[in-house]
Amino acid sequence: MISDNGHVSVDAREAAEALAQHYANESRLAFSSYDKNFARVTRNQVKSCRVRQADNPLFNVDFTLPELSYALQNMDTIKSPGPDSIPGHFLSLLGILGRERLLYICNLSWKTGKLPRQWKSAIVIPIHKLSKNAGLTTSYRPISLTCITCKLMECMVLRRLTHHLHTNNLIPSEQFAFRKDHSTVDQILYFTQCVKRFSESQTNETHHGGIFRCVKGL
């Protein structure tokens, strides 16, 4: 493995160190004074939310066993576990007492606004890109394995946020991607239909349309 500075790794440990340094360099961001000030204001707003009740009771009440059961039923049990080494299949077989203890941890995190330390870490696995030189650090893309227990918590939070956004019409109809039944493919089909209808209504004129897409090399 050849690191970013040209050093050649002689064993697996050095190769892992080279990949870790490469990913650290790639993920390092340069923040302007405006960015730092915006981040400071945002952190203060988040902290203020912990000491006062939300206007919507949906964000004040604890999560329930049915919510946790829904998250467990929709969990992908074949995904690899994270730093806690707890597999999804094990969690799917939890009895009522196990689910109550897991729910207690989730609600404690929900009320305090803090995450368990392991939930904030990940195991990074480098995946080799097809047809790329296996000896270069740039030929591997990182996959982060996070704790599945944290993913269950994320699923419950997402369901509440989605319900709040939809019931209050806070998501515009033009928003596609990252929404159920609103994929980017649906948007493309809708766009082509609009262009077709417009071209059919303009029989005496010629119009040309174009779609521009920016693709960053993997």
Image (cartoon, rainbow, N blue to C red):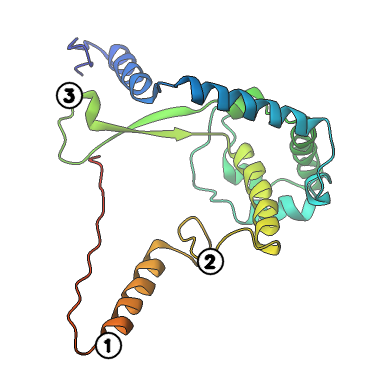
Above or below, comparing residue 196 to residue 179 in the picture: below
Image quarter of residue 83: top right
Above or below, comparing residue 79 to residue 85 in the picture: below
Quick check: marks 1 and 2 in contact, CB under 8 Å?
Answer: no
Sequence-wise first label, 3 or 1: 3
Q: Residue shown at 53%/36% (left/top)?
A: 81
Residue for badge 1: 200
From the viewer's side, name the closer residue of 31 and 129: 31
Q: How far across and down, in percent of the image, does residue 157 sit?
A: 68, 46
Secondary structure beneath label 2: loop
Image quarter of residue 42: top right
Amino acid type, mark 1: Glu
Quick check: marks 3 and 1 in contact, CB under 8 Å?
Answer: no
- Using residue 12 as the reference point, say whether residue 101 is left or right of it: right
Residue for badge 3: 135
Secondary structure beneath label 3: loop
Residue for badge 2: 173
The alpha-carbon separation of the residues under discs 3 and 2 comes to 47 Å
Quick check: marks 3 and 2 in contact, CB under 8 Å?
Answer: no
Amino acid type, mark 2: Ser
The alpha-carbon separation of the residues under discs 3 and 1 comes to 55 Å
Residue 114 seen? no
- Using residue 164 as the reference point, say whether residue 181 is left or right of it: left
Q: Residue shown at 77%/56% (left/top)?
A: 66
Q: Residue shown at 84%/39% (left/top)?
A: 53
The alpha-carbon separation of the residues under discs 1 and 2 comes to 25 Å
